Structure formats: structure tokens, C-alpha cells
Image: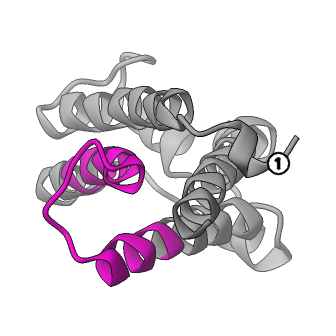
Amino acid sequence: LGFEDFPDMTLIASLLFVSLLAVALVHLAWALGSAYPVGEEKLLARTVAGFRGIGNMPPRLVTLAVAVAVFLCGLWAFVLTGAITGFPEWMVIWGGSKMVLLFGARGILGYTPWWRRLTPEQPFATLDRKYYSPFCLAIAAGFLILTIWRLA
């Protein structure tokens, strides 16, 4: 089966959007002071950030910015399908390519010795290899499919 056999990429865009919306909402909760899902800030920081010696979550404004950025990334999936319009074609492709690079780089980074030295705290290090990095690679793959489909 080729891309022409899947003229409606709405399912892939929807899966990307829902996944990234969930990530954005969790970041929003953290920006508002929640320690979900672990209940305590230090453990949360060691679970979701993992930087050497981390004791507190990143600043709330930074976490809010991440929430907004991730939400906008999710919306870009619908830009690639044409469900959201108003962007020049070069920008649509450029944005899709940047999503592939951004999420792909983050996914690959999680398996590098450099990243592990930077983020050795547990349980982050284990969760990153098992879940966070593969999730980013899956998101990158979804954006790659949508971007290639848009080019076809």
C-alpha cells in the first residue's frame, strides 16, 4: 500500500493531536502547581525531568511555555492535513519537517550517553528509555508520514 491508498490522514493527525494534547494538559497542571501523578515535587522532578541533582520542577512559566508549544505542535498535525488552513504551502511543509526533527531528535537523544550523563536521576532515566524517547520517536514518525503525504 502506498500513500495514495490513504487519502485521509485525519486518523494519524487525530492520534498525534490527542497524544500531544494529553502531554500539554499534564504540563499545564504542573505549571499550575500540581505534582500529578506522584504527589510530591522532588519525586516529580526526578520522574519527569531527571537532571543530575534536581530537587524542584522547572520554573512554572517554562513549564507553561512547554504546554503551549506542545499543544501547538498537536494542532500542526491538522495543518498538515488541510483541516486548518491559512498557511502558505512552504510553511506547512517547513513546520512538518521541524516537527519530525524536533521529536525525532528528542527521541534519539534519550538513547545517547551524553543525555544519560545529563539526566541520570531515577526513575527518569528508566522511564525515558522505556517510554518518553519511544513516544517522541512515534510522534516524529506520525509527523513524517503526514509531511510526506502532504508532499505527495
Q: Quadrant of the C terminus?
A: bottom right
Q: Position of residue 89 (x, y in %)?
A: 32, 76
Most common SS among magenta residues: helix
Q: Identify the residue shown where x is 40% and y is 35%.
A: 17
Whether 92 is drawn above or below 23: the answer is below
- Whether residue 63 is in magenta: the answer is no
The residue tagged with tag 1: helix, strand or loop? loop
Tell me, yes or no, if residue 57 can be seen here.
Answer: no
Q: Identify the residue shown where x is 65% and y is 72%.
A: 105
Give the extent of the magenta segment.
68-97
Q: Relative to residue 65, is residue 139 drawn left or right?
A: right
Tell me, yes or no, if residue 11 can be seen here.
Answer: yes
- The residue labelled by disc 1 is 2
Q: Quadrant of residue 34?
A: top left
Q: Relative to residue 70, is residue 133 drawn left or right?
A: right
Q: Position of residue 31 (x, y in %)?
A: 17, 40
- Whether residue 80 is in magenta: the answer is yes
Q: Nearer the viewer, residue 14 or 37?
A: 14
Q: Quadrant of the N terminus?
A: top right
Q: Position of residue 51 (x, y in %)?
A: 54, 61
Whether 4 is drawn above or below 115: the answer is above
Q: Nearer the viewer, residue 138 or 1?
A: 1
How is colour applied across the structure in the image?
Answer: one colour
How many callouts does the rendering have? 1
